[in-house]
Image: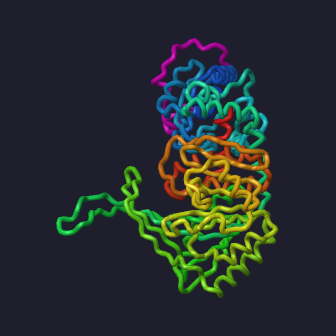
Amino acid sequence: MRHEVTRPVDAPGKIKRLKDLEPVLRAARKAGKKVALCHGVFDVVHPGHIVHFKEAAHRADLVVVTVTPDRFVNKGPGRPVFNESLRLEALAAVEYVDHVVLNEWPTAVETIALLKPDLYVKGAQYADPRRDVTEKIKEEEEAVRKAGGKLVFTGGFTASSSSIINRFFSVYPPETQEYLRDFGQRHGSAGIIRQMKRLSKLRALVVGEAILDEYCYCIPLGKSPKEFIVATKFLSEERFAGGAAATANHVAGFCGEVALVTALGPDPGDREFFAGKSRPNVSILPLVQAGRPTIRKRRFLEPAFLTKMFEIQHLDDAAMDAGSEARLGAIIEKQAPKCDLVIVNDFGHGMLTKKLRDFLSSTRKFVALNTQTNSANMGFNAVTNYRRADYVVIDEPELRLAARDKYGALPELVARTRRSLRARDFVVSRGPSGSAVLSNSGWAEAPALATRIVDRTGAGDALFAVTSPCARLGMAPEVLAFVGNCAGALAVETVCNREPVDPVRLYRFLESLLR
């Protein structure tokens, strides 16, 4: 094997495309040379990486490094710090590295099958598969075995790009950095992730209005010369499963089974749409009403900046009739005993009547509650319409409407409302100011963690959905606020409810923040 690197570094010549590298390695193996493959993000090349590559070079004749593309880096907002071109250049400058390639897939599995390395070299931190939150190391090991190679781990010291980035390249203000350091010392990411993986044993019941969100992308043209309107040019449209359907999808990423009890209109295409947008472990149990349409909110947006210009709502927001109320109550009553928690997502569009709210308040199951104030209910949908909940999540304006207090001290308003609902944990989301939680252990605040906002629609639903089963499990209140802000930060990077919060992406974000 190679013990000393004597040739000069030819950084530009080292960077190759996968399709060009494959024949090069085939010829090298034919000549009896051993090939080692290293793979990763390599956001900041640090001494730990250099030792890693040096050890790989001692074991093989050629060292190939494949790099995760920007679009597949799942370490949370603000990552990668350096784009893929800069990361390729930095790695190519390392003398122990012979070839650098931008990967074409999220993991190395397909690349291993293509390049067939003799050795797939990982850092010592991956020797224990329990520490791999992506759970991909087993798949990579199997791919190496099928390719005729071997998985090996380097020793030496290890370091973390994330810890270096958090210390020297953080995108957060000093007070947020201080919060993360302090929080990380008291609550390590491994413990939080371990707790969250236990959620897979839970079965959740989500109750609330499913909303068909439509985005109509248009370009404003100008004022019509003969009318007092602004003309727009239609480009395209996109449909999303919103409301309680979005909540169910978020929850389903963490809980083993999710049942969604909702109300839909008579069009069978609506049920097919929601079923097609749901995760496999979501069961939709709809009350179909002949005289009421499925709630549909159609927004008109300028596509470059997702600026919302206008909205049309298709709904009947009057309370449903007594017959429909009884049928919906029967569905809830049948499903609740089968579940570990009931998640109530009330958008105030007439589905959840006073009788149904009273029934949900009286259930012996753990109840997580979110009520929303929006343009259609004009503040009538207050959280105080319920008599009890174990866990409550609302935003600050909704809390102030419920408390009928515009300027009062927030902790006092939360305490009063929490007491009226007999809630154990009460979370208030505050947008760019983060969130706060009041529980028996006191008041705790967590800063906002979003760094790139694409679309705020659905961010609150993500916070509520991800933290509700965590609250059922008894997770510490300040951890609920932190995890919720992480989920919200990931959600605002997605257009509307295009994708639910992915557990692996959330875990990677937690890890990178707390290193």
Query: For residue 347, what is the image quadrant?
Result: bottom right
Of residues 13 and 507, the one nearer the viewer is 507
* Vertical arrangement, residue 243 with respect to residue 94, above or below: below
Q: Position of residue 469 (x, y in %)?
A: 74, 56
Of residues 475 and 158, the one nearer the viewer is 475
Residue at the spot 65% in from the left edge and 46% down from the top edge = 436
Residue at the spot 49% in from the left edge and 33% down from the top edge = 83
Q: Position of residue 426 (x, y in %)?
A: 70, 54
Residue at the spot 69% in from the left edge and 76% down from the top edge = 356
Viewed as shown, does residue 87 lie left or right of 501?
left
* Vertical arrangement, residue 275 with respect to residue 18, above or below: below
Is residue 64 shown to the viewer in this render?
Answer: no
Q: Position of residue 503 (x, y in %)?
A: 67, 50
Region in magenta: 1-27
In the rendered image, which quarter contains the C terminus? top right
Is residue 235 shown to the viewer in this render?
Answer: yes
In the rendered image, which quarter contains the N terminus? top right
